[in-house]
Image: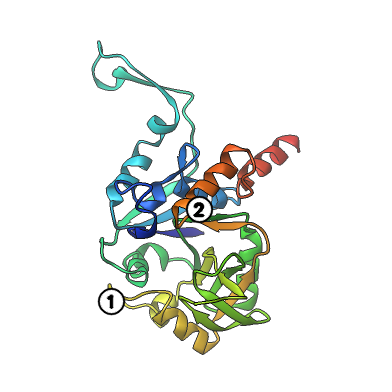
Amino acid sequence: MKVAILCGGKGTRIREVSEATPKPMLSIGNKPILWHIMKIYGAYGINEFVLLLGYKGEIIRDYFLNLSDYISDVTIDFSKSGPERMTVHDAEKEPWKITFVDTGDATMTGGRIWKARKYLETERSFCLTYGDGVGDVDIHGLLGFHAKHEKCTSVTGVQPPGRFGEIRAKGEKVFAFNEKPQVTAGHINGGFMVCNSDIFRRYLTPVESEVFEAGPVEKMVKDGELMMFEHQGFWQAMDTPREYSLLNELWNTGKAPWKTWDRKERAKKAA
């Protein structure tokens, strides 16, 4: 199972935190939010990622190419040259396989997914999410839900304040998807989606300006091919400076509900 992560947006609403850093690389604690998202999936044994890069994508690429150097103690001996010059101490290792796809600075979400087609359509289904939201989502439950209903796409529905894409559902079947609601009392799109690979044949196109949450999703709703997996636990996007501060406060005080990998690692050691 692969996870495609949309990492290409400019994050204009959070630019006052940092204009030099792409939003997926803004830190929670001392790690980028993108690292946290990947750890969430890794806790469920899903470790193959396709990062859909755009704005300042080279910063994301550079971070993962030098991950051990960033997260471990490093000694540099300037009296030496070549590989012997640097020693990485107790390097943290992740079982990740990452494909970086440059999808262009101005490409919209639908176009970005299409540009990763050759890496995603080889499997029956793939996970899809955004590079700016975390939660204690039951990924195994989501995958089981998707396999059971056999529709094209499953989206995780959450219930925080409504600024995102409102989902209106009858039971599990979605009958309306409003990308920018004025007021919402129902679920919103929390990302953490699962798509069948035939989404490329049925709903996506190579048009760079195509917004996934508009045309393709609206067509799926019309066809009865979009289903909602209800998540009643924690979920939070990092879309504003206030949300950036909130997530860092939760992490720094040891109250981060999305740190599911820590609980799973402790359970494994205790078994």
> Does residue 47 show up?
no
Q: In the figure, 83 relative to 15: above or below? A: above
Q: Residue at x 36, y 41 (%)?
A: 63
Q: Three-letter amino acid code at disc 1?
A: Val
**In the image, residue 26 lies at what x, y percent?**
41, 46
| Disc assigned to residue 32 | none
Name, please, the residue furthest toward the top. 79
Q: Is residue 236 left or right of residue 54?
A: right
Label 1 sits on residue: 207
Secondary structure category for the residue under label 2? helix
Q: CA distance from mark 1 to mark 2?
A: 32 Å
| Disc assigned to residue 243 | 2
Q: Nearer the viewer, mark 1 or mark 2?
A: 2
Callout 2 crowding tier (Cα within 10 Å): few <14, some 14–19, many ≥20: some
Nearer to the camera, 2 or 226: 226
Position of the C terminus by quadrant: top right
Q: Three-letter amino acid code at disc 2?
A: Glu
Callout 1 crowding tier (Cα within 10 Å): few <14, some 14–19, many ≥20: some
**In the image, residue 16 lies at what x, y percent?**
36, 50
Name, please, the residue furthest toward the bottom. 222
Please say if the residues under marks 1 and 2 sit with CB atoms less than 8 Å apart.
no
Q: In the figure, 159 relative to 23: above or below? A: below
Q: Residue at x 33, y 76 (%)?
A: 210
Q: Residue at x 52, y 78 (%)?
A: 152
**In the image, residue 173 lies at what x, y percent?**
62, 82
Nearer to the camera, 144 or 24: 24
